[in-house]
Amino acid sequence: MKSYLIGLIGSGIATSLSPALHQAEAVHHRLPYVYRLLDTAVLREDVGDLLRAARRMGFDGLNITHPHKQTVIDHLDELSPDAARLGAVNTVVFAGERAVGHNTDGSGFAESFARGLPGAPVGRVVQLGAGGAGAAVAHALLGLGAGALTLADVDAGRAARLAAELTARFGAGRARPAVPGDLPGLLPGADGLVNATPVGMEGHPGLPVPAGLLRPGLWVADIVYRPLDTELLRRARAAGCRTLDGGGMVVFQAAHAFRLFTGLTPDTERMLAHLKDL
Ligand code: SKM
């Protein structure tokens, strides 16, 4: 029986939930499957050197996380269409002699959104954060049919660049940049709000928007998953909003990566239930 050796390359990843999520799912498939952390902050190695070492040591695939999702591309032989569009890779499959980069963050968010907020209107959506995770989420939202997506980022240039890329791909008027100061003018007319900033994560406490802007009729999605119940989601529920936590995205991106590594279809409901026990 084939066994799998998978790794996660990232910096400061000691508390990642990926090993537990992947390995528990593999047990249900009776698959020998080991998922190891390759922390660049601990190993003091460059992402390219680690990737090549992992391949030489017989790893079957890798997940890639912050801050290497873009820089890893220089060390790959091929990109999937999604990874090429996003310019970011979170999954590498070693296929024979080739290292192929994929991105399952966008598809992970899209599946989580469809499952967790069914029927949510997406005419006008405001997204906070236009960084790496924000780019994947923004592509997913426009792919899900968001009519007009406004990207608010403290770095105005970053929001402008992502909005320009999205407009080129999805059409004029579908994406535009903003700064956090614009939010009081934007949120009253929005259907939904997505937090793709680190605010609310362990170590980054607080709210990414003033609580007074949350109101019934606005859905709120957070991609932060440590903790699952962020202050934003608590305030949003108290204000009468439908909410979606970041657990779905982390599970579905892991599930899509598991399928790429093994060719097997994971049971995502089981993985979602497992996440709650972690
Ligand atoms: O894209 C994912 C990555 O596949 C795994 C991960 C983690 O384990 O913390 C986070 C995200 O970047």
Image (cartoon, helix red, strand yellow):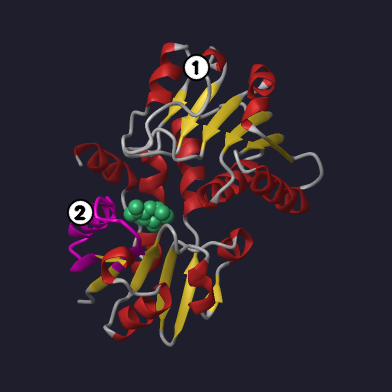
Upstream in sequence: badge 2 or badge 1:
2
Tell me which corner region of the image, top left, top right, bottom left or bottom right, holds residue 57. Answer: bottom left
Provide the residue designation for mark 2.
Answer: 24
Q: Quadrant of the C terminus?
A: top left
Observer-nearest residue: 160 or 171? Answer: 160
Q: Select label 2 or label 1 by which is in front.
A: 1
Inspect the image, locate mark 1, and give the three-letter code of the amino acid beneath it: Ala
Give above or below for 267 relative to 261. above
Give above or below for 194 relative to 64. above
Q: Position of residue 32 (x, y in %)?
A: 18, 68
Ligand 1 closer than 8 Å to label 2 CB: no
Asked which secondary structure carries label 1, the reply is helix
> In the image, which residues are magenta?
7-36
Q: CA distance from mark 2 to mark 1?
A: 38 Å
Question: Mark 1: few, some, or many residues within 10 Å (few <14, many ≥20)?
Answer: some
> Looking at this rendering, what residue extends furthest in the right direction?
172
Is residue 81 on the magenta stretch?
Answer: no
Looking at the image, which residue is at 45% across and 36% down? Answer: 115
Answer whether labels 2 and 1 touch (C-beta < 8 Å). no
Asked which secondary structure carries label 2, the reply is helix
Provide the residue designation for mark 1.
Answer: 211
Q: Quadrant of ligand 1?
A: bottom left
Looking at the image, which residue is at 31% across and 71% down? Answer: 44
Q: Quadrant of the N terminus?
A: bottom left
Give above or below for 34 relative to 231. below
Inspect the image, locate mark 2, and give the three-letter code of the amino acid beneath it: Ala
Q: Position of residue 175 (x, y in %)?
A: 72, 41
Observer-nearest residue: 144 or 197? Answer: 197
Tell me which corner region of the image, top left, top right, bottom left or bottom right, holds residue 248. Answer: top left
